[in-house]
Image (cartoon, rainbow, N blue to C red):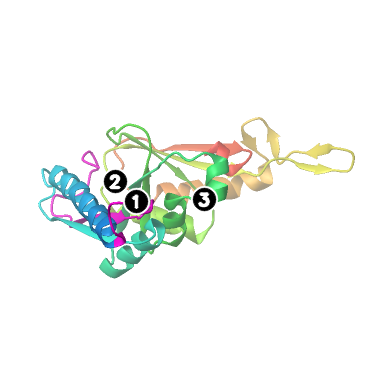
């Protein structure tokens, strides 16, 4: 977050959700357990806020109780946040299926852009944008073009073509004329789509890469 290219006057709320994940010990009441959990969450929020104040003076720490996915979305709605930033816990596919994922819940339900941070912190040097003809893609392009997140950075656009369709006895009808090239009747449409996306960034300092891939969109992206 410290390396994120946000303006210095950005207002930031550090939200920590206190979750009672275990019953109280034999020597404490539920009230004591709840207070202890809230105090621990408050200390974590203040530590994070102190780190962020080195770059953004307008930082406040907020502590709430409840389900993290629900509370993060609620706070974003209440404060009219422009972006939510949270870390990925790295749950495997089975755990995500059984217990759900906070980051996935927030990404699906938040009223604004959501940044899910993985791995170690690093500066933003190259941004990849998946492009299609959906309203979600148009919103993403508008958000990026209006923000400082990609300004002065290398930018690539990618469109993913669905995999070949299987007919009859396993016969595959490819949607590409040859490897890496969309078939002619579709190619003009894809090129126009990528060109329109690139036009959203007239101030780009570097040539904008345009790529076409074939396969499952999530995997190819």
Q: Quadrant of the N terminus?
A: top left
Tell me if mark 3 has few (under 14), some (14-19) or many (20+) residues whose alpha carbon lies within 10 angstroms of its own. few
Determine the residue located farthest toward the bottom in the rendered image: 78
The residue under label 3 is 99
| Residue at position x 22%, y 38% in the image | 3
Extreme residue toward the right, this view: 169
Residues at circles 1 and 3 in contact by the CB criterion of under 8 Å: no
Q: Secondary structure at mark 2?
A: loop
Is residue 10 shown in magenta?
A: yes
Q: Which mark is residue 144?
A: 1
Quadrant location of residue 184? top right
Front residue of this view, candidates 166 and 49: 49
Viewer-nearest of discs 1 and 3 = 3
Q: Residue at x 48, y 40 (%)?
A: 91
Tag 3's secondary structure? helix
Q: Is residue 82 above or below residue 53?
A: below
Looking at the image, is mark 3 or mark 2 nearer the viewer?
A: 3
Is the Cβ of the residue at disc 1 closer than 8 Å to that at disc 2? yes
Percent x, y of residue 158: 50, 41
| Magenta region, residue range | 1-30
Which circle's residue, 3 or 2, is located before the other in the chain?
A: 3
Q: Residues within 10 Å of mark 1 (few under 14, many from 20)?
A: some
- In the image, residue 60 lies in the stretch drawn in magenta: no
Q: CA distance from mark 1 to mark 2?
A: 6 Å
Which residue does the numbered mark 2 point to in the structure image?
Answer: 149
Q: Position of residue 189 (x, y in %)?
A: 59, 50
Circles 3 and 2 in contact, beta carbons < 8 Å: no
Question: In x, y percent, where is residue 192?
Answer: 53, 49
């Amino acid at each position: 977050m410290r390396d994120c290219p946000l303006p210095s006057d950005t207002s930031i709320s550090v939200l920590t959700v206190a979750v009672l994940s275990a019953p109280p010990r034999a020597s404490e009441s539920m009230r004591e357990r709840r207070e202890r959990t809230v105090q621990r969450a408050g200390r974590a929020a203040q530590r994070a806020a102190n780190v962020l104040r080195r770059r953004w003076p307008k930082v406040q720490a907020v502590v709430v109780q409840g389900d993290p996915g629900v509370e993060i979305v609620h706070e974003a709605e209440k404060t009219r946040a422009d972006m939510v930033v949270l870390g990925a816990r790295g749950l495997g596919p089975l755990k995500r299926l059984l217990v759900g994922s906070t980051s996935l819940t927030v990404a699906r339900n938040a009223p604004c852009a959501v940044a899910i941070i993985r791995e170690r912190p690093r500066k933003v040097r190259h941004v990849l944008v998946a492009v299609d003809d959906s309203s979600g893609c148009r919103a993403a392009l508008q958000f990026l073009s209006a923000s400082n997140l990609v300004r002065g950075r290398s930018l690539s656009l990618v469109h993913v073509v669905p995999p070949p369709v299987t007919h009859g006895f396993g016969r595959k009808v490819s949607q590409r004329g040859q490897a890496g090239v969309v078939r002619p009747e579709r190619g003009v449409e894809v090129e126009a789509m990528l060109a329109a996306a690139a036009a959203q960034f007239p101030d780009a300092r570097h040539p904008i890469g345009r790529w076409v891939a074939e396969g499952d969109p999530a995997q190819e992206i």
